[in-house]
Amino acid sequence: MMRLKWLVPTLYIVFLLLPIYWLLNMSFKNTNEILGGFTLWPVHFTLENYAKILTDRTWYMGYVNSLTYVLMNTVISVTVALPAAYAFSRYRFLGDKHLFFWLLTNRMAPPAVFALPFFQLYSSLNLFDTSLAVALAHCLFNIPLAVWILEGFMSGVPRELDETAFVDGYPFWKFFIKIFMPTIAAGIGVAAFFCFMFSWVELLLAKTLTSVDAKPIAATMTRTASTSGYELGLLAAAGALTIIPGAVVIYFVRNYIAKGFALGRV
Amino acid sequence: MTTRTTNQKAWWLVLPVVLLVAFNAVIPLMAVVNYSVQETFGNNQFFFEGVRWFEEVMKSPRFREALQRQLLFTATILAIQIPLGVAIALAMPRKGIGVSICLVLMAMPLLIPYNVVGAMWNIFALPDIGLMGRGLNALGWDFNYTRQPIAAWVTLVAMDVWHWTSLVVLLTYAGLSAIPDAYYQAARIDGASRWAIFRHIQLPKLKHVLLIAVLLRFMDSFMIYTEAVVLTGGGPGNATTLLSIDLVKIALGQFDLGPAAAMSLIYFLIILLLSWLFYTVMTRDEEK
């Protein structure tokens, strides 16, 4: 039985790759071939879909815009979450447990109807159609998650580390940046990965808060679908390209995940 | 657990987080509360309606049906994804090149934007040009998700399992890797069975990551919108009209802001209540 153990992940990965294969398959066909019939691989192999996306400014700027707000959001979320997670992991203070759960509740607001108030809020601040607006809006669900993950890692670091440093006369911020942050580097990596992921895939808020200048790639795709009929090949190529940034990020943090984290007190 | 010292100054460390999140959470929430008690006929004219919309939503069979579908969907995917995710994480390699391959490949569905996921499955499951639809038809199942409610449900659940099981796998795998070897050595000396190791060592150690996995999957599946809309649009008929889809139909389709706002508040409270239940039950024996 133990010898067949590898079968479980293998079958699962095959299941995961089937729809992705189908996406890639379509991305190398033109739209007529896709609609014309069922073939398991592209008969008239073409790269024109990719060529169009990588040369047309309205297309490739979508990726640039998305990456801009995702990176801004990841930096903001992790930066403010670090001291907060430290506070939750090391100190007791008035309302700490309630605050922790309250943070979590912010992942629970159904974005469907909250989209309109978000639009009004960011319009009134003159931030509409900027990357900053989307980056700030995504903080709503990413900061709580970052705090949660980082707190888990920090609780795994013995308090003696802090105490020794303070006895040695380190001021708080110097200790935090020079000693503490390197100790929990894995946690920062994992938190950044999850922030990147949830910001990259979110569409509803990103679409509501942008129109032209900061329009994310996912919104560019929906617009193409509605104006010029269904350009399936092009959409498939654009979809296939959205996988790449995330795959690069997971490649860099894979070792942190493999090393394990226990996420201490919840 | 390390003991924490009381220090009210810690509030200063938490303050930036509180301000940023409150800015995004409290102001829009207040706007929704404001809509939920008023009637509007456009032109920015609003009339106070009290709790009328709440009563109307609670009484409407449409809301109750959407809620039932939502509960069924969430229960189904939790029942599949959590055990499946744990099983896969247990079977994954612990070291070597296989770890990287598994992690990178498994994380891929998580990193695809929601509407792309919906569109991929929309085509993947089509009976004429999709691999899954075509395949199932070839196997003798007359499968057409645009017309059959059952097929639409199967496609929706399969899509969600495909999309999110890896999150459970990643969290569980990370939790498993954090268990020190000494625990396993002790179990080996005692001659513990595979099941006993899982039940008495791995499961208790995984409690926290599983809590996170269950809560994340519960909340996100309860709010699923983009993927489901792109995949089935709530159809055929109303067969896959989940709560959020119904909500948007009311809010944007009919522009009934009042009832839509009341409905989203009820929706929010249901998620809050159920999450609080999970949270309380799973952390019951902590901190004394």
Image (cartoon, grey):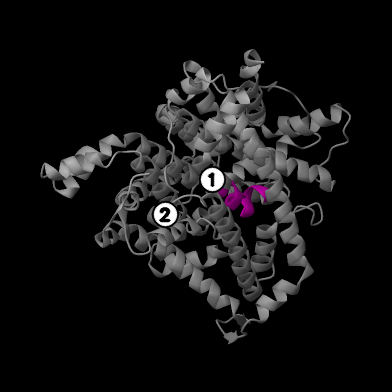
Tag 1 residue: B211
Please, is residue B272 above or below residue B167 in the view? below
Q: Is residue A211 visible?
A: no
The residue depicted at 71 percent of the width and 54 percent of the height is: B71
Callouts 2 and 1 in the same chain: no
Which residue is at the far front? B190
- Give the crowd class for mark 1: few <14, some 14-19, many >=20 residues within 10 Å: some
Q: Amino acid at mark 2?
A: Cys
In front of the other: label 2 or label 1? 1
B217 drawn magenta:
yes
Residue holding disc 2: A139
Q: Quadrant of the N terminus of chain B?
A: top left
Start and end of the magenta stretch? B215-228
Q: Look at the numbered discs 2 and 1 and tell me whether their residues touch, using CB distance below 8 Å.
A: no
Outermost residue on the top side: it is A3
Question: Closest to the observer: A152 or A55?
Answer: A152
- Tally the numbered discs: 2
**Residue A179 located within the stretch drawn in magenta:** no
- The residue type indicated by label 1 comes to Leu
The spot of residue A90 in percent (x, y) is 30, 50
Residue at horizontal 60%, vertical 27%?
A: B196
Based on the displayed image, in which of its 4 quarters is residue A166 positioned?
top left
Chain under numbered label 1: B
**Alpha carbon separation for disc pair 2 and 1:** 22 Å
Whether residue B25 can be seen here:
yes
Chain at tag 2: A
Q: Position of residue B150 (x, y in %)?
A: 83, 45
Q: In the image, residue A17 lies at what x, y percent?
A: 63, 27
Determine the secondary structure under disc 2: helix
Query: Image quadrant of residue B135?
Result: top right
Quick one: B107 or B89, which is closer to the camera?
Answer: B89
